[in-house]
Amino acid sequence: MSTARAARAAWPLAIAALLTASATGCLRSDGESCRVDSDCGGGAICALDNVCRTVAAVEASLDTRQAVDVVTYDTVDTQGATGDATGCEPVAGVFDAATGACPEPTTKRTVTAIVIAQEGGLAGLAEVANQVIANGFDDGSLTLELWIDGSLAAGCARVLAWMRGPEDRNADCTAVFSDAMPFVIPGLVTTSVDHAQLDPETLVLTGLVDKAKLIESMAPELRDVAEQLITLDVDTDGDEVADMASAVIQITLAE
């Protein structure tokens, strides 16, 4: 077994230890280096620059704060503006249902990093998941592209598709993940962020995650601890009972 495969095989045990450790005390102070939130003490968390910082400081730097009280949810347009802003590429219907050879978008951007923000329903999962996701991009076990029909720039119309490989495009040319993004934590989770909306300026993606499906995709020995780390905070059916977990995710794209 190769070193990389052996490391991936050991991930479930390592992840279980990290998930359990997430509820224990932390060691490092505000301003000191870190790798995950459990390295930090005194109410600090591990920020994106791998430095322990207060929650308020991290929220201010991300500028993506949202209420985590139970809120109702309405379906919205996830494909961006519909106006014809100056300098925008036209939407060519690349992902419309069709027969024959499927057209390709003019723009494909490689995703190089996915970081779960320290807010929303997935915040408790971030401290272990972010490092595993980073490792996945580093060793090639995690790959993802953003295909763009139209323009990603603010004010432009667009249709987005998230592609891991050929399996994410249907035979009729439609995209499997257009208003959703595949959400994979190697060795831990395989699910999706539904109703995914990507801010073209900040590249912060927001959406909803089905907690039951996420936990079902995990190894049985991890589910009990993960249950405590994922918070249902969005009411999608208006009955004042939260039934989905909100996701706030920072996306990094290669130029």
Image (cartoon, rainbow, N blue to C red):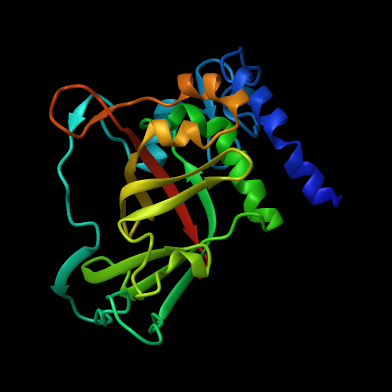
- Which residue is found at the position 54% from the left and 53% from the top? 113
Quadrant of residue 95 in the image?
Answer: bottom left
Left-right relation of 76 to 99:
left
Spot the residue most to the top. Answer: 25
Q: Position of residue 69 (x, y in %)?
A: 24, 24
Q: Position of residue 236 (x, y in %)?
A: 20, 35
Q: Where 225 falls versus 178 (above or below)?
A: above
Q: Position of residue 218 (x, y in %)?
A: 55, 34
Of residue 108 and residue 63, the one placed in the foreground of this image is 108
- Which residue is found at the position 62% from the left and 17% from the top? 26
Left-right relation of 95 to 3:
left
Q: Where 204 falls versus 31 (above or below)?
A: below
- Which residue is found at the position 56% from the left and 24% from the top? 30
Of residue 130 and residue 161, the one placed in the foreground of this image is 161
Quadrant of residue 171 in the image?
Answer: bottom left
Left-right relation of 36 to 83:
right
Q: Where 245 falls versus 90 (above or below)?
A: above
Q: Position of residue 152 (x, y in %)?
A: 33, 69
Q: Where 53 falls versus 168 (above or below)?
A: above
Of residue 60 and residue 133, the one placed in the foreground of this image is 133
Left-right relation of 208 to 24:
left
- Which residue is found at the position 54% from the left and 20% from the top? 225
Quadrant of residue 162 in the image?
Answer: bottom left
